[in-house]
Amino acid sequence: MNKKSLLADISLLIVAIIWGSGFVATKNALESISPFFISTLRFSISTLLMGVIFFKKIKNIDINHLKTGLIVGTFLFLAFSAQTIGLIYTTASKQAFLTGTNVVMVPFIYWFVSKEKPNSYNIIATFLCLIGISFLTLDGSLYINRGDLLTLTCAVFFACHIVSIGYFSKKCDPIILTFTQFLITAILSFLCMIVVEGIPKSIPKEGIFPVFYLGVFSTCIAFLIQTVAQKYTSPSHTAIILCLESVFGSILSCILLDDKFTYKMFIGCILIFLAIITAETKWNFLHDINKTIKLDKNKFDNNF
């Protein structure tokens, strides 16, 4: 592994930690700020930062970019709205893993759109995921609370968002596409805030840092790091490392928010994590590791 690849993997690990900590930041923000107000502030901050950093590209935006941004941004808005509201009724540690189930859903949504059937790895991942979700969310009465249900809904919208990004990124500049979806999400969040929650008089002091963290780090900076880092590492490395978001989210929630973690939840998280790894990588990294070991062994044998 060269220095650039190592630095890229470390950078992606930082992204996973940032995204994992975002669940904690959102939970803290919800103690003093309403859900749609959080989304409005979060995406307004990220839109402003993207606008300043990439002004030369964004100034060339046209109506087609806005139309695309409307579609992708609507999915992003629905996903974050369901996620943020859902976090009122569930723990951040559970939500971290439930949100990660979106990668298992993507192939099936893509199948609906493109008629391309999921492979056997996707089907195996789905079964693992469903079993994991049952361990993580169901109690003795087979009841799923509204927070877990909203979080699973958010995972569906995140999956739709990923599929739409995959489709439109081939036709649009990724920077402009990111900016427009942030802009649309901010506008839709603002409109819902006015209708559902009313116009807030001020931002509570205790909510300033969590929202700032979400807007600057979890949204804008994390995206920029990911975009640059993926140029210097393999897709399998990227998938595996970013899957750790759910792990970091749960660990940080237990440490910082004192979330309770039962043995059933632990089993559920392990199964969901295995499902994510199966869906994202098809375990190709094991082949790469085996290949590397064989090459190293051959070099060793040649030297002696």
Image (tube, rainbow, N blue to C red):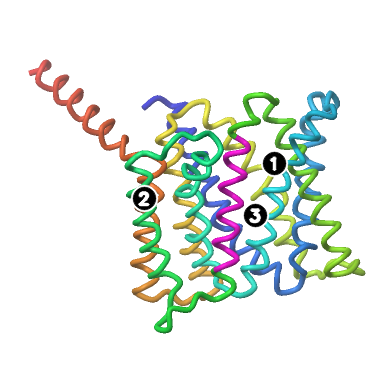
Point out the image quarter for the C terminus: top left
Instruction: Look at the numbered disc 3 and give the secondary structure of its residue.
Output: helix
Which mark sits nearer the N-terminus, 1 or 3?
Answer: 1
State left or right for residue 172 relative to residue 246: right
Q: How many other residues sit within 10 Å of disc 1, few (<14), some (14-19) or many (≥20)?
A: many
The residues bearing labels 2 and 3 have C-alpha atoms spaced at a distance of 22 Å
Residue that numbered label 2 is attached to? 125
Q: Amino acid at mark 2?
A: Ala
State left or right for residue 122 relative to residue 45: left
* Front residue of 53 and 65: 65
Q: Residue at x 36, y 68 (%)?
A: 266
Residue farthest along the bottom direction in this orientation: 141
Q: Quadrant of residue 54?
A: top right
Residue that numbered label 1 is attached to? 72
The answer to whether residue 222 is above or below residue 275 is above
Residue that numbered label 3 is attached to? 79
Q: Residue at x 47, y 54 (%)?
A: 101
The answer to whether residue 87 is above or below residue 216 is below
Instruction: Look at the numbered disc 1 and give the secondary structure of its residue.
Output: helix
Which mark sits nearer the N-terminus, 2 or 1?
Answer: 1
Q: Give percent across and percent down for residue 194.
A: 88, 63
Q: How many other residues sit within 10 Å of disc 3, few (<14), some (14-19) or many (≥20)?
A: many
Q: Give percent across and percent down for residue 161.
A: 62, 44
